[in-house]
Image: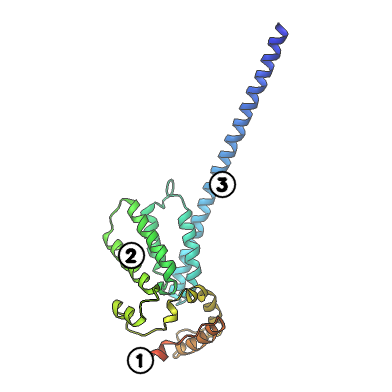
Amino acid sequence: MKRVWTIAWTEAMKGAWTIAWMVAVVMAVVGCSAQRSEAQTTSDIGRLCEIRDSMERNRRELELWKNLSLMAQAMEIVESIPEEGTEYDAYRKACLIDTLMGCCTETDMAREAIRVREYQLYLLSRSGKKNEDMERRIEEKVRQWRDYTDESLGTDEYRERYGVRLAFDAVERTARYEEILPEAEAKIRTLCPVNRRQMGYCYIYWEKKAEVLREYGIEWESPAVLNPEVMFD
């Protein structure tokens, strides 16, 4: 009887040690995951700050086209950063998006701009903070970009509705144009002079842009062609 009890006790202790070991392993894994997650968040925030600085530099240097791809990278990080335990709460994220979008030409990314701006409104609604001026401005932008991407709305009607003075090619409102633009712009810039501030640069740029877009099957007319009464420099 004693031997049976001893065997039973030994087996019970083995089971207890096995469970304890499994719990320890699970806790270690959870701890490592938490550390990795914290390290990843720190890395993501650092990368986000680098992207923000690059976008602001591109804006100053008149290279806004580079920000089309950078904005997509920035949004991926913004949406992944946890709001708990970081300084990036919902309101801070909404304000950061405003700064980033200020470095972009939104008509060049109108469909993505709608998504980004609607996400920004969502963040503001969740933040519990009222910023009526920002909300109103974002809502107006969403409404405008929805009209801009609505190809059933004539370009002249769109211009009249939003006070756009210069005529522009309707192809710029298409999904295809928006999709290929970052890649096309990179090609265009390699064909243009380095000094973007020289007189007549815009004419060279528009000529090369028409050539490159034709490679993508897009026929495009420049502002100079569509606005013959306007003198560009």
Quadrant occupied by the N terminus:
top right
Q: Which residue is mark 1?
A: 230
Q: Residue furthest bottom?
A: 229
Q: Amino acid at mark 1?
A: Val
- Of circles 2 and 3, which is in front? 2
Residue 40 at what x, y percent from top left?
54, 51
> Residue 172 in the image: x percent, y percent?
44, 79
Marks 2/3: CA distance? Answer: 36 Å
Q: Secondary structure at mark 2?
A: helix
Amino acid type of the residue tagged 2 in the rendering = Ile
Residue 115, which numbered label? none
Q: Which residue is found at the position 29% from the left and 80% from the top?
A: 160
Residue type (three-letter) at the residue carrying disc 3: Arg
Q: Earlier in the sequence, mark 2 or mark 1?
A: 2
- The residue at which mark 3 appears reads as 36
Tell me if mark 2 has few (under 14), some (14-19) or many (20+) residues whose alpha carbon lies within 10 angstroms of its own: some
| Residue that mark 2 sits on | 138
Gap between marks 1 and 3 measured at Cα: 58 Å
Residue 179 lies, in percent from the top left, at: 50, 73
Residue 155 image position (x, y, % from top left) = 36, 81
The residue located at (34%, 51%) in the rendering is: 127
